[in-house]
């Protein structure tokens, strides 16, 4: 009995220590080493291609690594530039047409109130005045709070943009260097305890956490494309911005595409735009169906963790890390469990 209590106490201390270490690592160490982690991830992804090219061409790993990373960087950069350019153009058009959009929303609001009055026989009264008051409050809040806040923090945004560029540059350079010496690095890590632990975590991450993150990114991309195409076919001038935003909502916990499509559908139904309401309903059903189909196929039984555990890790991660906790929460939970399991196996061997 005493041995059992002693072993239980060691496990509690181990779990507390691992949890504390993971928290401090995610909170303070990760921001410093994140460029090298991105570089290592890129190197792991590109290494099989590098080895194939080296075998077929006989060229050196250094040259092949540099060329391959440059090609990938150019392709990704071009894609991001085109998407970003289109999004910025639509955002600029959105601000330029703000008055027209406000007038359209005002017309929809008043028409909707009139239809509700005629259908229910209830006088809403002063609907237009209510909208004008709400509109003035929104404008006043934007001019007095949001706009000054954005201008006040413009230097911080510029600093963050330059910081992102620096992280990307260091990540690319580190990926080239890691790819050049990849076989030697793998051998060196395989001979050390830390390397073996990292190999175990990496293997399990690919089986579980990597599967989850890869699946969510793929589902996000597919649903965003569906929304962009659907809104583009309806003639929406801001299809790219709105589609990407709806896809992002679908990826966030407790939100989903229904948060956007259902209100749009109700507004169009009230205003007699039955075709548009049907289109939004179809898009909502298609997005929900796609997620229900893709998620089991992409994740299946490979995750190894109950969905409630993933949801809890996201919820706790948001409270601990902020918005980044959507990703850092599951990663932290996965690392805590893997390191704790490794520690328990060591304790069992020493017992």
Image (tube, rainbow, N blue to C red):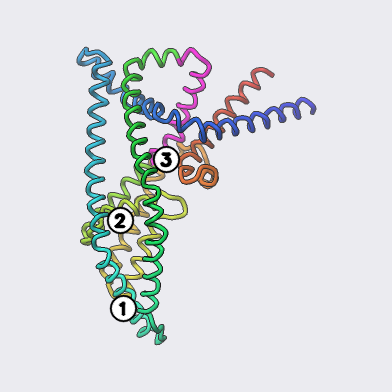
* Residue carrying label 1: 111
Image mark for residue 242: 2
* Residue in view at x 27 percent, y 16 percent: 62
Image quadrant where residue 126 sits? bottom left
Q: SS class of the residue under badge 3?
A: loop
Quadrant assignment for the N terminus: top right
Position of 235 compared to 1: left or right? left
Residue 53 lies, in percent from the top left, at 23, 19
Which portion, as a residue range, is magenta? Answer: 189-215
Q: CA distance from mark 3 to mark 1?
A: 46 Å
* Residue carrying label 3: 299
* Residue in view at x 34 percent, y 53 percent: 245
Q: Earlier in the sequence, mark 2 or mark 3?
A: 2
Q: Earlier in the sequence, mark 2 or mark 1?
A: 1
Q: CA distance from mark 2 to mark 1?
A: 24 Å
Image mark for residue 134: none
């Amino acid at each position: 009995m005493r041995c059992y209590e002693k072993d239980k106490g060691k496990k509690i201390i181990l779990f507390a220590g691992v949890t504390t270490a993971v928290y401090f690592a995610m909170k303070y160490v990760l921001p410093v080493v994140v460029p090298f982690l991105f570089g290592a991830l890129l190197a792991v992804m590109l290494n099989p291609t590098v080895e194939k090219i080296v075998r077929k061409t006989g060229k050196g790993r250094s040259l092949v690594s540099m060329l391959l990373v440059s090609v990938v960087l150019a392709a990704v950069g071009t894609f991001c530039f085109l998407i970003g350019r289109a999004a910025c153009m639509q955002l600029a058009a959105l601000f330029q047409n703000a008055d027209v959009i406000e007038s359209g929303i005002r017309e929809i609001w008043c028409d909707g109130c009139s239809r509700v009055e005629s259908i229910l026989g209830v006088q809403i009264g002063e609907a237009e005045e209510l909208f004008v008051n709400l509109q003035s409050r929104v404008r006043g809040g934007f001019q007095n709070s949001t706009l000054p806040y954005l201008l006040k923090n413009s230097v911080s945004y510029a600093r963050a943009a330059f910081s992102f560029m620096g992280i990307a540059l260091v990540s690319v350079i580190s990926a080239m260097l890691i790819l050049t010496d990849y076989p030697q690095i793998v051998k060196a890590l395989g001979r050390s305890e830390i390397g073996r632990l990292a190999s175990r975590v990496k293997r399990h991450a690919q089986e579980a956490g990597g599967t989850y993150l890869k699946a969510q990114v793929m589902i996000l991309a597919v649903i965003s494309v569906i929304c962009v195409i659907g809104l583009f076919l309806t003639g929406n001038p801001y299809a790219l911005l709105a589609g990407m935003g709806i896809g992002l909502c679908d990826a966030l916990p407790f939100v989903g595409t229904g948060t956007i499509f259902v209100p749009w559908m109700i507004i169009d139904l009230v205003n007699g735009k039955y075709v548009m309401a049907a289109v939004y309903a179809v898009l909502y059903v298609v997005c929900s169906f796609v997620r229900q189909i893709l998620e089991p196929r992409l994740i299946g039984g490979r995750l190894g963790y109950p969905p409630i555990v993933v949801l809890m890790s996201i919820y706790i991660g948001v409270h601990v890390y902020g918005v980044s906790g959507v990703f850092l929460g599951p990663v932290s939970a996965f690392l805590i469990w893997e390191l704790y399991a490794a520690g328990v196996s060591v304790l069992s061997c020493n017992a």
